Image (cartoon, grey):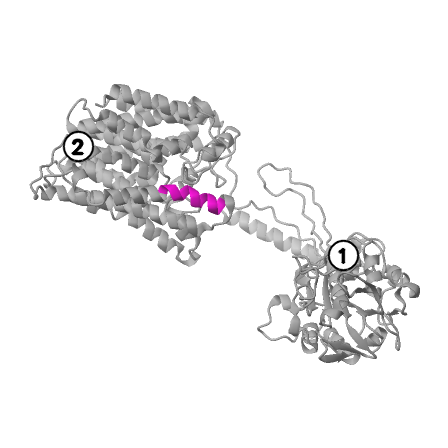
Amino acid sequence: MLLLPAFLTYLLCIASWILGAATTGQTQEEHVREFFGKNGANTTSSHTNNWAVLVCASRYWFNYRHMANTLGMYRTVKRLGIPDSNIILMLADDTACNSRNKFPGSVYANAGRRLDLYGDNIEVDYRGYEVTVENFIRVLTGRVEESVPRSKRLLTDDRSNVFVYMTGHGGNEFLKFQDNEEISAFDIADAFEQMWQKKRYNEIFFMIDTCQANTMYSKFYSPNILATGSSEIEENSYSHENDNDIGVAVIDAFTHYVLEFMEGINKTSQTSMRDLFNSYDFNKINSHAGVRSDSFPRPLDRTLITDFFGGVAQVEVLPPNTDWYGAPSKELPTLISTRSETENHRLNKIPQPETRSGVSPVRWRGSGSMRAWGSLCLVGLLIGWVAVAKK
Amino acid sequence: MTSGVTIPALVAGRLLVSLLPLPDALQHDHQLSSPLTSYSRLQEGIYLFKNGIDPYSGGVFRHSPLFLSLFSTLLPTSRVTSSILWTLCDAVGALALIRIWRARQRVSSSSRDGLIGAVYLLNPYLFLPTLALSTSTFENTLTLLSIMFASEGQISASLLTLAFLIQLSLPSLLLVVPLFMLLVGDPVSRLASPAPISSDLRKTIPMLFEFMVYSIVLVLASTLVSGSWAWIPNTWGLGLTLPDLTPNPGLWWYFFTEMFDHFRPFFLVVFSVHLIIYVFPICIKFQHDPLFAAFILLGILATFKPYPTLSDPGLFISMIALFPEIYPYLRHPIVTTLLHLHASLLLPLFHHLWLTQGTGNANFFYAITLVFGVSNGAALIDCIYAGLRIAIGKGDGFEVVQE
């Protein structure tokens, strides 16, 4: 009995698939462009998900500001929509509960201690002695041991935009890791090249706040990398301010002004990278912040901040079903496009066959109250018969 | 203690209490009502039915369709009328208990009538579920009515009320065997002198047919109300498939929350068969006193039912009043009473601690559920022992005196 409608729906599926496949070609590209263009008229982005790798390469109490730098970036990136599952946060994490911290359990980034960046809702993936050069390169390239849990892996694909932020003590083409070892600009460049070969990123935005930071991105040779640093060669990067009660510097100047710029950004913002880079001011930062965009394919004024800092999701709102019993509506549903954590599907509009969901609603044969009276009469008859006729 | 004064006084007192403004939390309490008996679910089902939606299509309404027909036509479901109806139901149950007692003693009235009525009406295990408007009151009343008609020899009425009871609660099928034995025998106490069953068991066959006819008519009436056969898996199937794991004072729910799906069918079968295996041993051992067998099986139902409430052990405890001959032979009545006291005081406490306050967890409540099961089991074992011990008779020079 069910065979005939099942066979008909199967034929319908095949027919619509063939039809959809036959109309690919020209319209396919338009579909893709339209899908990616939904973020706004001013964008040329081609990513579907966002990741962030935030590294603080220093430890000890007097490097409080590096911890605050990274936590400030973490907070901004989370606020703009990248979830914890897409953020790899590497911190020495010895500041908040340090015995020298007058405000235990808190990390502040400004002199008035207005905003606690530590809070009770942060997820540090690599902490303490796990923040090593080897782990950093393993995270980037994906060559981690089998026992490493998912939260500590960078699970990017070829449509991921990755934001890599590093801060600490650095020098000419090197960055000091945990007062113990150093990573060189060549190492990072090779790691990025491995990522490119393995198709582990769509675009990378590399930001670094150390002394002589711009040297760290001078050695990149992979495509689609946009980089910015806080100071030129032979130049120091300076901290921004001290807090008198904490007793150490709480934030670096470059990161402070970048974060201040970010405070004006929300998820729907159309502010471009060009605006960010134009906001760099030597008088405020006290060092020459640099930008390297030669391998970056898109124009910077058409590249949004949220392409790297945010995890923007697109939602299409479909009209509500009007059928009372919940049977699927007659219109063919369009695909809901999202821009977070989805693969790049083939965008055929596959029409859904009209199927009934598992439990079909019962059609009332006759009104309910009539049936209730009917059954009540039946029961009453039974009781009456037993009471009267039988002993 | 004349029953003519006490029973109306108690009923009036209960009416008064039930009409007082009671907290609504009582209706949602997990000890007093289960998914099968909850008043709020009944109201939900009636509302859905009145608005043309099948109440059995969701997982909310688990009552029998006969409730739908009753409450959507004859009886309104406001709080006042429901309280009055439930209290009157309990009063009918108390009267049924008194008449069972009289039939057992072969007297038309006795001095203990008032006491027995009071034991039923004042039992907190029965009083509180009635205040919570749990439909287990109907189940208890129908059980007592069925046993009463059987004790008085009215076969058809007994079978009809039993058929109604099965409609409301499938596990009560356990009562079919002792009830049939009661119908062909009599309720008089023969615990002290056991003998093989003297009445003709072949007379039960036409009774079986009559019972089947009544059941089929009621099933048809239920199907007519609900419009489809969907009510069967949603009411009767509940005890067999256990889809709803709401906490209750029973032993099933916790077990099945932590059960792997792979073993679920096996353990459902085990638990269901566990209920059934008690029927024939108890009926064979107490074939000389089928009323006592019914009493013991009610106790087993109370302990091992899929969705018990407090009213099931309440019925069992109140029915102990019918068997004063076993009191001298109870070995540990005080321990049982204290266990019951312990469990009944801690059940609501740990329930509150777990679900309201959040400082406890389910293990607290489950532990007290286990203690409650132990206390029911202790009462059962004591009663079975005493029922058998009487037969051994006097040994120490004491004489058993029946009132």
Residue A24 screen position, x and y as percent: 74, 59
- For residue B187, which numbered disc appears in the image? 2
In the image: residue A379, left or right of residue A275: left
Left or right of A159: which side holds B45? Answer: left
Give the residue drawn at x 51%, y 32%: B48
Secondary structure mostly seen in the magenta stretch:
helix
Numbered marks: total:
2
What numbered label is drawn on residue B356? none
Residue B84, above or below A345:
above
Look at mark 1 in the image and give the residue it sits on.
A113
Reply yes or no: does residue A11 show up in magenta: no
Q: Residues within 10 Å of mark 2 (few under 14, many from 20)?
A: many
Query: Quadrant of the image for the C terminus of chain B?
Result: top left
Query: Which residues make up the magenta segment?
Result: B344-355
Rendered location of residue B290, percent (x, y) = 18, 37
Q: From what the image shows, is residue B278 above or below residue A193?
A: above
Q: CA distance from mark 1 to mark 2?
A: 85 Å
Q: Residue B382: x and y, percent?
A: 22, 44
Query: Which one is nearer the viewer's eye here, B308 or A23?
Result: B308
Are discs 1 and 2 less than 8 Å apart at CB?
no
Q: Quadrant of residue B26?
A: top left
Chain letter of the residue carrying label 1: A
Q: Quadrant of residue A222?
A: bottom right
Asked whether, in this view, residue B221 is left or right of residue A347, the answer is: left
In the rendered structure, which amino acid carries the disc numbered 1? Arg
- Label 2 chain ID: B
Tag 2: amino acid: Pro
Label 2: which secondary element: loop
- Residue B302 x %, y %: 31, 42
Q: Who's the residue at 63% across and 65% down the image?
A: A151
Residue in the foreground of this view, choosing between A207 and A15: A207
Residue B313 shows in the view = yes
